[in-house]
Image: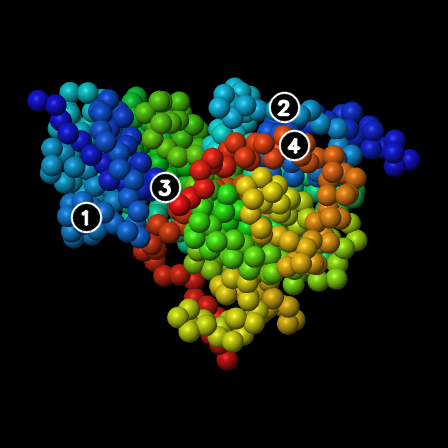
Amino acid sequence: MADEIILLDFWPSMFGMRVRLALAEKGLKYEYRQEDLRNKSPLLLEMNPVHKKIPVLIHNGKPICESLIIVQYIDEVWKDKSPLLPSDPYQRAQARFWADYVDKKLYELGGKIWSTKGEEQETGKKEFIECLKLLEGELGEKPYFGGEKIGFVDVALVTFSCWFYAYETFGNFSIEAECPKLVAWTKRCMEKESVSSSLEDPHKVHGFIMGMRKRFGIEVRLALAEKGLKYEYKEEDLRNKSPLLLEMNPVHKKIPVLIHNGKPICESLIIVQYIDEVWHDKSPLLPSDPYQRAQARFWADYVDKKGFVQNAGFFFTHSLPKAPSSS
Amino acid sequence: MAAISLQTETMAEEVKLFGTWASVFSRRIEVALKLKGVQFEYIEENLSNKSPALLKYNPLHKKIPVLVHNGKPVAESLVILEYIDETWKHNPILPTDPYEKAMARFWAKYMDDKLLPAAIKVAMSKGEEQKGVIEEIQKQLKTLESELKEKKFFGGESLGFVDIAANTIVWLVVAQEALGMEILTEEKFPVLHGWYQRLVDDAVFKECMPPREQHLSFVKVRFGSSTPSK
């Protein structure tokens, strides 16, 4: 009897990508369903009532949740092809340990890099690199964490690599400079079709995060913080917009609005570029090369058009950067 | 001296533009390149049979316009306009003052986010629905008029970023004539109408407009219908 496999997922999720990768490794056919996380499908809510999160694998009508649990399930059911976990119990325990380490540390630290600035971001960067260095040590001289072939830890970690470009851009650092062996490993993995077809384009991911920062008004606050500017923050009640907001943005009546010496600027990416141009001596926010700038604008525009920013909710497992206290 | 350096600059570069003759978006790029005196190769695309080159240069959207500068592609018309302005810095189309630049970006975005979707809707709708969309567009045109005020162009004394993005209005005027609608009239919008005349009379802009008769037939064929709504 043919298996019915459905994967509920959301394209930028590195957790969903792990499942895609495991299914590809096993050569399995499945139905991919994109979830709108602001409008979760009845199926998702039925199949994962506890967490209401993606990814969820539905195998012959039965749901399995939590990406690493799903990957192990796939490995055990389709055990004859491309085993991901070692057969020896001690090695299996080691593999599970490291996959769990990736889970516990990397996502949160990565989040600090793109959603915070200043000291909090620096700490996030430092700890993120320390994690990667530790993982590099674990890899050692092996071609893959799984030895000669891709294994469980490779699957758990490699999906983060398509987020590296975004982390590097927002954190202004080079992962390759800090962890060359690990980056070499990511390239080696990408040579495999199962990996390259399961991971997303790093530029697309970067655009998605830019969109999320924009959606939550973070982009402007971060730009101001980056330039070391003092500002007064006014929280708007969007169901009861202030006269000032209506006066300063009569066309759209939306936030964010930056008011600089009495003059209003609207639309967050336009505000960020304005900030970058007025305070151009410090910490450039956009790349200086026109072609890179065009690429950054292109991806921000793409995210805008596709409405992916609406689905940002689930990525916020940690608190947003706090607004400066108003006097 | 300036003329010589311009020539050497263009000789060393390879600039290609993929577009279509009736596209409001690719025509914007032609205007910008011509304003800067940049030599380019124009490739007319057949959108029902896209060239392998187009698919290679814009794999994500598979749309025109795409500017290819020394082999590197840039897509999305407003993104391309900014790239052109930053790469060929003479005859700037964006203001240098950051505030003015922010304003220019805001209004260009307004053209694409608000005016264009409404213009497409008005061409596709009929009867009561069309009346409603016409009203909506007229509100937008009023907003644009109060932004334009006494200026010759949105960009001031000469064509700028917003004027180029506002070529949508030229397409709207063609649509209103082709489909028998009354949206932008001189009586209702004297200020905007004045601007419109200056735009279509501008030497560079004029050169980049689709041939009028062809454009009118194109719109009639695409959006018109033989039977009026009951």
Outermost residue on the right side: it is: B1
For image coordinates 26% across by 24% down, the residue present is A25
What is the chain letter for disc 1?
Answer: A
Q: Is the Cβ of the residue at disc 4 closer than 8 Å to that at disc 3?
A: no
Viewer-nearest of labels 4 and 2? 4
Residues at marks 4 and 1, CA–CA distance in whole angstroms: 53 Å
Q: Is residue A252 visible?
A: yes
Please identify, in this view, whether the residue under mark 4 or under mark 3 is nearer the observer: 4
Are both tags, 3 and 1, on one chain?
A: yes
Residue at label 4?
B213
Camera-nearest label, 4 or 1: 4
User: Are discs 1 and 2 both within one chain?
Assistant: no
Give the number of callouts: 4
Kindly identify the residue that appears in the image at 11 percent across and 36 percent down: A61
Q: In the rendered view, how is the structure colored?
A: rainbow
Disc 1 to disc 2, C-alpha distance: 48 Å
Residue placed under numbered mark 2 in the picture: B43
Q: Which residue is mark 1?
A: A42
**Residue marked by disc 3:** A12
Q: From this view, report whether residue A31 is shown above or below residue A317.
A: above
**What is the crowding at mark 3: few (fewer than 14 residues within 10 Å), some, or many (at least 20)?**
many
Q: Kindly identify the residue that appears in the image at 39 percent across and 41 percent down.
A: A132
User: Mark 3 falls within which chain?
Assistant: A
Q: The residue marked by circle 2 belongs to what chain?
A: B
For badge 2, the amino acid type reads Ile
